[in-house]
Amino acid sequence: MEPHENTGHPRRWAILGVLVISLLVVVLDNTILNVALRTLADPVHGLGASQGELEWAINSYTLVFAGLLFTFGVLGDRAGRKRFLVIGLVLFGLASLLSAYAQSPAQLVGARALMGIGGAAIMPVTLSIISNVFDPRERGRAIGVWAGAVGLAVAIGPILGGALLEHYWWGSVFLINVPVVVVGVVLVALLVPESRDPQPGRVDLLGVLLSVVGLVALTYGIIDGGEHGFDRPVVWLAILGGLAVLGWFVRHELRSDHPSLDVRLFRMPRFAAPVALVGLVFFAAMGVMFFSSFYLQLVRGYRPLETGLLFLPFAAAQLIFAPRSAAMVRRYGGRAVAAVGLALTVAALGAFAFIDASTPIWVVLVFFFLQGAGMANIMPPATESIMSALPREKAGVGSAVSNTVRQVAGALGVAVLGSVLSAVYRNDVASALAGLPAPAREAADESLSGAYAAAARLGPAGPKLIAAANDSFVSAMHWAAALSAVVATLGILIVLRWMPGRPTAAPAPARPEVEPELAGTA
């Protein structure tokens, strides 16, 4: 019967597969570089990059990516989502090639910034294309697959990076992107229909500019503060300046007759609550994943590849539960599913407050699995709630807001929880550093990695320093994990108060008006 006819694209599941491929290459790059940092610092086998240059190799990508996500999501709605996806993939592939063959740290930093531009063009349009090619009744399931792909990429990035570095030169961690991009561009050109906002109106140039400046300044302040301390004026100038510009952006959007983001959407609980939830969950989760890598590699002594493999339970849980979350939401409602997912996530994050250097590794793997299962039942219903609050033609805005909040909150989580970790570590390890030579004392006081490097030059005194540093790091990890669990618990309160519950029965939507480009593709 016509009222129950599926309004999705005939090749929607094949299109989803193409979008997952496009998404994997972006998310992989966020994690794969971390395992190559030590090699890049080597003057013989790498580029001889300093600590500051290594930080910028990561941060140049993050800054550009976070700063442009919102703008490119909005512009993709106007110029054409397929077009933006192809342009983003091509730029990402070319920048990956430049990164792989960079001859100096400065060239690598510049190429990584170009990769950030390409990634910012790719990520938001994948989600908005899903909203346009899937019937609303299937959209939740499709978003679950999309979210599962994100979780998979986060986990397999270190595995792939470690495997490549054990057999090839450092540039292979970037070169691997190129064939994936080539396949992605061909499949996008063949399968993905073009779609855009049929009534885009004028471009909100001032709003776009303010969003970019505000997000870049805020992200820079968060990252720089996390790496070098929040006790410097430049950090707070960037953070407060970024917040001030974003406040100007909100005021401008409220007064504009053609806003790039209708900020009144945040008065709608089904839009505002899941946006806040995404931010809290990624703040907590990314901070814990940051320090758990150091725990596994240094305290427990696993190699980079082995460390990556230990994150597989997280990926497996994402793949198992995320695609099934839509069915759970239909049966129990988004509020119940997200609340249970958050409870599992809080339990998994809080469990790190009780893990030490002798905890059986299978226990750690169970906690990773629980965290993956919990997040798999948080992100899909939250993302579906955000996307369903907007009409299809404005899907890029919802996608852009969701991805921007996730990126900034993740950076903030690493910065804040990393600062807590550093402060507690330095306080605890101080007593063990008395009497050490000044260079060793300074290195060990800086970080756990520095303590291991210093211990290698101390001879018989080295094992004692390593034992003290490990104990101090584990104690600091407990505090950071407890804080992350508290932050995630706030999400439970938001879900129970504002997230929509079980949907009421309603007739299936009639076929919407679609533009010729979309309707004519079969």
Image: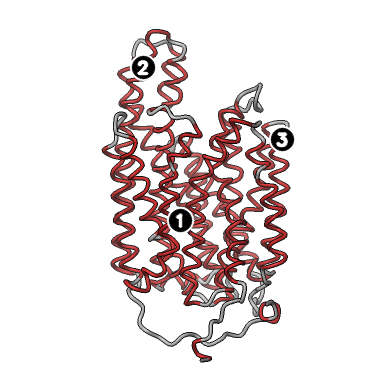
First along the sequence among labels 1 and 2: 1
The amino acid type, in three-letter code, at marker 1 is Leu
The percent position of residue 424, horizontal first and vertical second, equals 33, 32
The answer to whether 305 is drawn above or below residue 42 in the figure is below
The amino acid type, in three-letter code, at marker 3 is Ala
The amino acid type, in three-letter code, at marker 2 is Leu
Give the foreground label among 1 and 3: 1
Which mark, residue 319? Answer: 1
Give the residue at x 49% y 62%: 145
Which mark, residue 102? Answer: 3
Secondary structure beneath dot 2 equals helix
Relative placement, left or right, of 462 versus 5 is left
Q: Are marks 3 and 2 in contact (CB under 8 Å)?
A: no
Q: Read off the residue under disc 2.
A: 465
Residue 36, quarter of the rendered image: top right
Secondary structure beneath dot 1 equals helix
Residue 420, quarter of the rendered image: top left
Answer few, some or many: residues within 10 Å of disc 1's Cα (few below 14, many 20 plus, some between 14 and 19): many
